[in-house]
Amino acid sequence: MAQRSHIHSSLRPTLLIFLLGATFGALAFWLSSIYSLTTIPSAEAAGGEVTSPTGTAPDRYVYYPGTEALSKDEIRVVACGTGMPAARRGQAASCFLIEVGNGDKFLFDIGTGSMANVASLMIPYQYLDKVFLSHLHTDHMGDLLSLWAGGWTAGRPNALRIWGPSGADPEMGTAYAMEHFLKFVNWDKVTREYKISPIPGQLDVTEFDYAVVDQVVYQHNGVTIRSYPAVHAGDGPVSYKLEYAGLSVFFSGDTVPNRWFIEHGKDVDLAIHESMHTPEQFVRLYNQPPQLGWRTCCEFHTSPQAFGKIMSTIQPRHAVAFHFFNEPDTRYQIYQSIRETYDGPLSMATDMMVWNVTKDDIVERMAVSTDDAWSVPGTAQQPPPEKGQPNPLSESMNAGRWRPGFEAQDPALDKYMEKHNLQKEDWRPGMYEQMQQEE
Ligand SMILES: [Zn+2]
Ligand SMILES: [Zn+2]
């Protein structure tokens, strides 16, 4: 009986709301048709006033990649990964692209899944050759794989340059990780080296002492990048500060609230700092036992309240919170927790959020791009393949080539050869000759 009355009591208001809604809907439609006849033909779009039905909104609140030149004294930051180690389609793991007015671009972290977001910005790979790793957790470097191989096959002309911290011992440092990265990808590397230029497949690694405070790790063309120790899970993690044209972006990486971020973060323009889920969210949504949830949040990471305390202490022009799954179910609780200790300008970061930083303004927008972006060509040419690379495909495997399959593509390849003037580089006669010998 109790259950039935529950159903009734929930049905009745629904019906009432529906009837009221229908009545008001009809009234509103009637009123709006009168309104549209009597008012001037202009409306407010989200970006500003639309003065003509054939025109566009004058101030876009979105960023269309590749359509805006940076001014000389400007920094653009794009969040290409803001999430967690557990993968989700809507948010990759830690990655921030910083572009400065002189044309230089820097990737701070390259967390798992983030390269799809980076690629959607349609920046030629020749400009995506500088990566600064905050630490060696895979949610901060997992997509090195995609950048390394994707850039190699799609236009990076030189070695990929990696900066990263040392660790408590050599085996915990960036140089060790990258040396073994190349071992992990050895089959990939050796086979590509034979087919395309080996140079873009190399890593140019700069490991620096994680423990040095305010250390210049990069200085070139008006850009200075400094490192600061971060306190997180083990020795090695760092935060980075990038300075350009009198502007500064401070990126925490993963850290608990630490004294160096406070001392050197005072008055920075954009402060990007991790802000974790609340302990309850880790238990309810992230499958962690209560014993772990409050430690993940608040022992080896930064809680929302601690994030707020950091920001109200250093007072950046604009604060950015990241490293949480950002959705209606989590965002407001994290936001309210931050607001317990900080009332300044704040972005709750999610993937493809963009900040334009100038002396006058810091503007937050969302980047809008296609899911189907291709790599775009730049000005660079890849070096030619190197002669003398050993062929990793053996004769016994080559003997498995099936001639009718190759012959089937010959008419199309003849046309292609003619179109691109490749007569002198036709690889097919040699191949067919070899096939004949094998028979
Ligand atoms: Zn970490
Ligand atoms: Zn992390």
Image: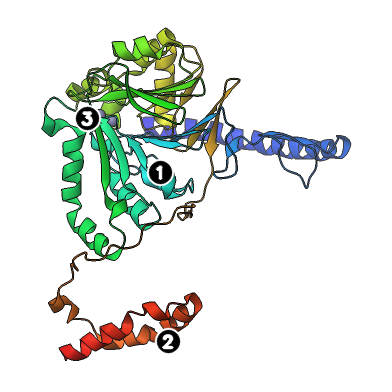
Q: Which residue is mark 3?
A: 288
Residue 134 drawn above or below residue 264: below
* Amino acid beneath label 3: Gln
Q: Residues within 10 Å of mark 2 (few under 14, many from 20)?
A: few
**Mark 3 vs 1, N-terminal side:** 1
**Residue 433 appears anywhere in the view:** yes
**Mark 1 vs 2, N-terminal side:** 1
Q: In the drawing, does residue 280 fall left or right of residue 156? A: left
Q: Disc 3, disc 1: CB below 8 Å? A: no
The residue carrying mark 1 has its beta carbon less than 8 Å from ligand 2: no
Provide residue 300's location: percent of width, then percent of height.
23, 21
Q: In the drawing, does residue 402 fall left or right of residue 96? A: left
C-alpha distance separating marks 2 and 3: 60 Å
Residue 419 drawn above or below residue 292: below
**Which corner quadrant of the figure contains ligand 2?**
top left
C-alpha distance separating marks 3 and 1: 36 Å
Instruction: Give the residue displayed 72% in from the left and 43% down from the top.
Output: 56
Q: Which residue is mark 2?
A: 411
Provide residue 293's location: percent of width, then percent of height.
23, 24
Q: In the drawing, does residue 276 fall left or right of residue 381? A: left
The answer to which image quadrant residue 400 occupies is: bottom left
